[in-house]
Image (cartoon, rainbow, N blue to C red):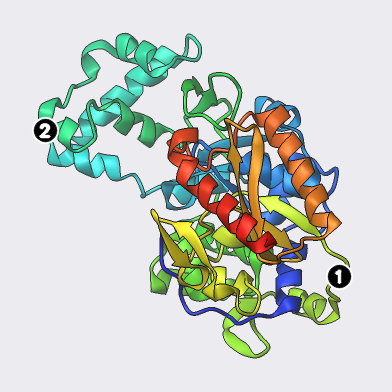
Amino acid sequence: MAKAKAGNGHDPKLQGWRAHRQGLDGALAGRTPAEVLEKTGWARSVGGVGPYLTLFARAGTSRAATDAAVAKLAIHELPAVRGCAYVVPASDFALALAAAEGFDSEIRVAEKLGVTIKEIDRLCDKILDALDDGPKDPEELREAVGGALRNLGEEGKKKGLITTLPVALGRLQPAGEIRRIPVNGRLDQQRYKYARWRPNPRARLRLGKDEIASEVARRYFRWIGPASLAEFQWFSALGVKAAKEAVGPLKLVPFPGDETRLLFADDLEAWRAFVPPKKPHIRLVSSLDGISLLRRDLPGLLGPGDEKRKVFADKALTPLGGLADLPSHGIFDRGRLIGLWEYDVPEASLAWMTFEPKPGPEVREAIRAAEDFVKNDLGDARSFSLDSPKSRTPRVEAIRRAGAAAAR
């Protein structure tokens, strides 16, 4: 769990603004999955329920509706910034794939093991030939490509690269030549088949490297501005100089009171006119939700005194103000983190706690709705692929203890 940077202080209006721009105020209710992701940002996907919770919290989207959007290619899970997997709307497929190029670490590992680019290119050609017959899983691909695939032996195994197949797949996906399809149509697992992507979504992209970076920056600051250059740099994995050059054409303006944070001029006017809602807007989100992950400034999402509260993170109790990321799934009210939750599989219920000892009826109603969604639509709420009911037990127990203590 990363440590927090210096926070932005406790600003209820700014917190409410971020919740509004992130669609956590009900403004996007009933919108399609693609529309939600266009407006609020690509949803980080690591084999957990993050994308489902992102869409449910903003638009009330069912799992079936999300899966249908995936099946229709209205949205898709693909490599994007930093080479990480995100669920992206169709309008951004080409941009996200282009932003993923250059972040494939496996090719560098393979080269150290004696693999050449020419060898990988030959394997890529064989994979494409094999997929002309239809989608195939990794085992079927291994059989189809025959001798073009190399086993990297014990040395490769030590480095986490058993064969050259992942290297070739990692090369073909950002190029838009292939896409991976969830075996059972769900985003919260990591079993895939691979298929040719026709037409290639990148075929009509006519942007240079600098223009691609600027388009990523344009989306980022619309999703979560005001934000600092350093925050955008983390999201995009660009160097300092490249990040400055990417932001330059956008003509962003400084945020009043903190010139390190930037936003679009029309967003500044909207911010000035923005009036935070007086009534609670409770939303339960994933630990990788955009409101937290895009900026990684957890202290800026807290209320006065909450930074001293201790929560279970990295196998120990840690002050919230010392973290950059949510230690569990979050409960938000108008952009302020007010509690944490996990799904308790044996009990088939949400384990939750709030920082206030007596949460209001709006909180309890939101918790009931989220519990029904997880129980009936998802079956579990894994944060990531290796998260399991057993590994989650310490977090569940810590949250239940904290909830019981707060209620006393």
- State whether residue 318 appears in this view: yes
Quarter of the image with the C terminus is bottom right
Mark 2 Cα shell of 10 Å, populated few (<14), some (14-19), many (≥20): few
Residue matched to label 2:
155
Instruction: Identify the residue at horizontal 66%, vertical 75% (top origin).
Output: 303
Q: Residue 366 at what x, y percent from top left?
A: 79, 49
Q: Residue 341 at what x, y percent from top left?
A: 62, 50
In the rendered structure, the answer to whether residue 375 lies left or right of residue 100 reads right
Instruction: Identify the residue at horizontal 67%, vertical 43% (top origin).
Output: 53
Q: Front-most of 144 and 351?
A: 351
Which image quadrant for residue 136?
top left
Numbered label attached to residue 54: none
In the rendered structure, the answer to whether residue 83 lies left or right of residue 381 reads left
Q: Nearer the viewer, mark 2 or mark 1?
A: 1
- State whether residue 246 appears in this view: no
> Considering only vertical position in the picture, is 123 above or below 101?
above
> Considering only vertical position in the picture, is 192 above or below 174?
above
Mark 1 Cα shell of 10 Å, populated few (<14), some (14-19), many (≥20): few
Which image quadrant for residue 302?
bottom right
Numbered label attached to residue 277: 1
Q: Secondary structure at mark 2?
A: helix
Tell which circle, 2 or 1, labels the residue nearer the N-terminal end: 2
